[in-house]
Amino acid sequence: MEKIPIICDGIYYVGVNDRDTHLFENIWPLPKGVSYNSYLIVDEKTALVDTVKVSKMRDYLEKITRTLDGKPLDYLIVNHMEPDHSGALSAIVHAYPGVKVVGNKKTMEFIREMYHLQAEFYEVDEGDEILLGKHRLKFFMTPMVHWPETMMTYETTEKILFAGDAFGGFGTLDGGIFDDEVDVAYFEHEIRRYYSNIVGKFGPMVQKALQKLAALEVRMVCPTHGPVWRTRPQHIISAYDRWSRYEYEEGVVIAYGSMYGNTEKMADFIARVLSEQGIRSVRVMNTSAVHESFIINEIWRFKGVMLGSCTYNNWIFPPMENLIINLAHKGLPNRVFGVFGSYGWSGGGVRGIVDYLKKNNWTLVGEPVEVRFSAKKEDLEKLRKLALEIAAAVKAT
Ligand code: FEO
């Protein structure tokens, strides 16, 4: 039987991997699954921090039972109520009838409404503490990161932050639990995809939460997804700070929608010009083939965005429109963008993109280029001019 990983003295990792779910929240692809992290503190009193999705309960309960080794479970800390973490809540309450369910006022409201659960509730608010013995838990309210009831739990002895969804991302933990045991580059990419698509809309609230936590000494970050940050907790905290400030790096995402390859050719032409201008990070992405969450992840990272669409029913090509609608939901400000595309007998794709993105508080660079069927020499000159202007805007400080 697999050994229960130890986070530090008296704190155990009892999370599970999910390789069965293909879409997180039934929207976001999970090419390498996802972990639901849960932590068990065994002291004079015991506390379980967050639970897991209901489908993974059998293994989860076994790990808890084995770790408790006959001790009762005294507290169940609910940092976040989304069902990937609260799904096993009812089962835990039934398995350990004496357990006190710890959360804030909103948590209690959500538990009653979501699970119609009769349990002993222990309501906490900002700065409240629970002493377990050697370990002491202190609670920080972090609303809208990314639900209204979200809070974080800080273990004051070992200085561990149980952060809920914050600092976590997609990808199962395949043996490694800690940042020094896994492919951190992969996880960072997937943490930003989680952030940009799920939490990113709430940047100002993330900033508030980070300011609140700034006074704490954090020795380890234990999120509810992805690796535990034990060697470089500040690394992921700083990344969250940058992302929630909407900071960007030099680079351009060229997202396109193309039925027969004409708009795609324009995308490749622009990419080459950008490269000639010394832009090293250029991402050409096909909206028909790549899920928008991956494109939004790159757009969150880079300053420049080029959007290209063929015309479909006098309007934007549907996969491209889907990307734009999703982008508008995120409220990402602060990007420079250019538009290009093609049409056969009536335009509309390019105009549609410009209309949408004006509302996003983005800066339109140059003149949009729309060509009939396929780009001719004079069209390519216009496209070159537009690409040069984007390159200059991206490099400008
Ligand atoms: Fe991991 Fe908001 O759930």
Image (cartoon, rainbow, N blue to C red):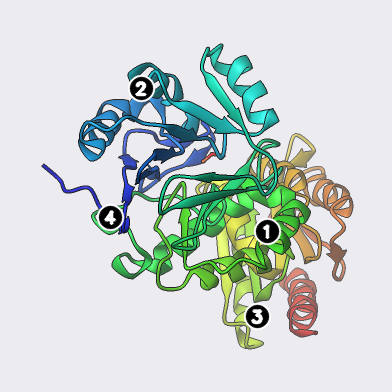
Q: Residue at x 85, y 70 (%)?
A: 365
Question: Residue 177 is drawn in which quadrant?
Answer: bottom left
What distance separates the C-alpha of mark 1 from that of mark 2? Answer: 67 Å
Tell me, yes or no, whether the two marked residues, 2 and 4, touch with CB atoms within 8 Å.
no
Q: Which residue is mark 1?
A: 374
Quadrant location, the N terminus: top left
User: Which comes before the other along the chain, label 1 or label 2?
Assistant: 2
Query: What element does badge 1 sit on?
Result: loop
Please give left or right for residue 129 compared with residue 244 in the image: left
Q: Is residue 62 above or below residue 376?
A: above
Q: Is residue 13 above or below residue 382?
A: above
Mark 4 vs mark 3, foreground winner is 4
Q: Amino acid at mark 4?
A: Ile
Tell me, yes or no, whether the two marked residues, 4 and 3, touch with CB atoms within 8 Å.
no
Residue 273: give its label: 3
Residue 202 position in % (x across, y down): 73, 49
Quick one: 107 or 380, which is closer to the camera? 107
Q: Which residue is mark 4?
A: 6
